[in-house]
Amino acid sequence: MQADTRYDVIVIGGGPAGLAAALEAHADGQTRVLLVERNDTLGGILPQCIHNGFGAVVFNQDLPGSEYAWRYRTMVEQSGIDVLLDTMVLDVTAELDVYAMNDRDGYMRLRPRAIVLAMGCRERTRAQIRLPGSRCAGVFGAGTVQRLVNIEGYMPGRRFLILGSGDIGMIMARRLTIEGAEVIGVLELLPFLTGLRRNYVQCLQDWGIPLYLSTTVNRVIGGRRLEAVETIRVGDDLQPIPGTEGLVECDTLLLSVGLIPENELSRKAGVTLDPRTGGPVVDSAMSTTVAGIFAAGNVTSIYDLVDYVSKAGAVAGRSAARYARERPDGRAETVTVAAGKNVASVIPQRIRFDTPVSEENLLMLRPSALMEHSVQVELRAGSRVLASFRGNYSRPAEMMIHRLKPQQLRALKSAPRREITAEIQ
Amino acid sequence: MNDRLNDRRGAPGTSRLERIICLRCPRGCEITTSLDGYGAILEIEGNVCRLGRQYVEQEVHNPTRILPTSVRVRNGRYPLVPVWTPRPIPKQYLRDLARSTRSVELEAPINVGQIVISNWQGLGIDVVASGEVERV
Ligand SMILES: Cc1cc2nc3c(=O)[nH]c(=O)nc-3n(C[C@H](O)[C@H](O)[C@H](O)COP(=O)(O)OP(=O)(O)OC[C@H]3O[C@@H](n4cnc5c(N)ncnc54)[C@H](O)[C@@H]3O)c2cc1C
Ligand code: SF4
């Protein structure tokens, strides 16, 4: 099958990462860009995020996700970038072949000079957390219900219980209440809130929805439809404490138990994945380990703020356009940053030193420990501290974002070894 | 129950103790404050900066919030359009406004920024579309 070689850069996924990547790749006026999206509209997950809390960094405004998406969508529409909607990318190869399909054009083979992976993430499912009990109807992913209620206008139950105090769980607790449903409470396995505090106040406290920490679902009870949930308290070891069971009558259980990067295509393309993030290993240019393939956004690691997804997408788009133009041979010099003490994951995992001076060189750490006092982040080679910066606190719910300064980059470049670790003290 | 953050204990006498999470910045300080019978701050603790004090004063006298929700649309590509109150509204009206928006039905098309409820209940509260719905 003859490959279509019209495009320099193909962006896979039309969420905030892909929209920013396409815009930036196209910005030089000579790169031919194609944006491919499997849904019937651009914006990714944002059109269903109708709550505010988006745009503080990029637009200096607090916007609903739907409006943030609309702004980027409008920019892409006005730019003249080619967009294929309702089109699923089925395969990507290390030779930069892209196989896609839609109803109108059928099966397509495209061969660009660079690719940006921006497929976002999907929800962890019931099977993945091994929820015991009946297989009855009425157990949903919180993101699925967000789509049902906010896009399709369908309310899937009357009395809800929510498992997981992440942002999606809390936002849905409020959302269902606003639409007139009853939300009995939010259960959290951990002894602390896993989402943002502003969401605790605005979504739970304001609407009188209780939060039960160190509590989880012990058993799902029901025939065809969910009838009740048996809850149980857990100890510091997160193991259930016998005798602390409680019974909650409800017809719907929402699971807000985490998101996982969508990486089927990344795997097919043969890019190296990081077991800590679940996404491709990327460097400061958002380049994966396969030359010519770039990645950005939730496909690389779950972000809590969309603004940084857009920024990462923009870096990937600029890098992909540069790669398509220059076709560099040979790999850039990098040092690898490993997650050390109190750090769950790092993006990018590899720092390179040839990025244009205009790039921000953001380093993002996902803390693994909750520390409500000022902390020091250290980038070290063995016992030697090469660079450090301070943070006001360390919370697993919030990424720590640091702009690497030129002198810090120089210090990392002179590292005695090619692998350094990031630690939070 | 074990809802530690929700715990609000009353203090003896006319003063009362409040625990308020400051929303002025993402840090979200947990502020403990004692207030006199008129809601004036007697003591305050836990705020890292002075904005926290301002926030507590506002939160005690006139707490405001943004309400994001959606309303039904007829003859549109989608059955709903997302809406919000771009200007924060007094917290006490959240539930009533939510109830009102549930019974509104609009006619497509709807554009971003379009006012869908103007001056609700004469209170100067506008509800504005944050998404668009084409007519079909
Ligand atoms: C419920 C919820 C609440 C949130 N709240 C906030 C908030 O208050 N503030 C904030 O800043 N951020 C928030 N976020 C985070 C933010 O929305 C995400 O970080 C951001 O949307 C991720 O963008 P993305 O482009 O990486 O992925 P997505 O938005 O998921 O976009 C990925 C796109 O790729 C497409 N795609 C996938 N596979 C293929 C394929 N094979 N072929 C073609 N297309 C494909 C998908 O259809 C999708 O459109 C929230 C997220 C969620 C889920
Ligand atoms: S008190 Fe200051 S630092 Fe603390 S949350 Fe409020 S504004 Fe932020």
Image: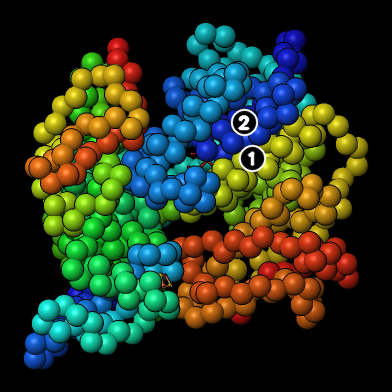
Looking at the rendered structure, the kind of residue marked 2 is: Leu
Colour mode of the rendering: rainbow
Residue A423 x/y as whole percent: 65, 73
Residue at position x 74%, y 72% in the image:
A387
Name the subunit of mark 1: A
Residue A115 x/y as whole percent: 70, 31
Residue at position x 52%, y 8% in the image:
A104
**In the rendered view, does A162 fall on the left or right side of A100?**
left
Residue A183 x/y as whole percent: 18, 54
Question: How far apart in space, not on screen, are marks 2 and 1 (Cα)?
Answer: 8 Å
Quadrant of res A105: top right
Residue at position x 52%, y 74% in the image:
A392
Residue at which label 1 appears: A314
Residue A160 x/y as whole percent: 20, 51
Q: What element carries label 2?
A: helix
- What mark, if any, has residue A23 been given in the picture? 2
The residue sitting at the right extreme is A329
Label whose residue precedes the other's in the sequence (2 or 1): 2
Q: Are marks 2 and 1 in contact (CB under 8 Å)?
A: yes
Determine if residue A416 is in view: yes
Looking at the rendered structure, the kind of residue marked 1 is: Ala
**In the rendered view, does A16 fall on the left or right side of B44?**
right
Q: Is mark 1 on a helix, strand or loop?
A: helix
Residue at position x 11%, y 33% in the image:
B103
**Up/down of B69 relative to A334, above or below:** above
Quadrant into which the C terminus of chain A falls: bottom right
**Up/down of A296 relative to A416, above or below:** above
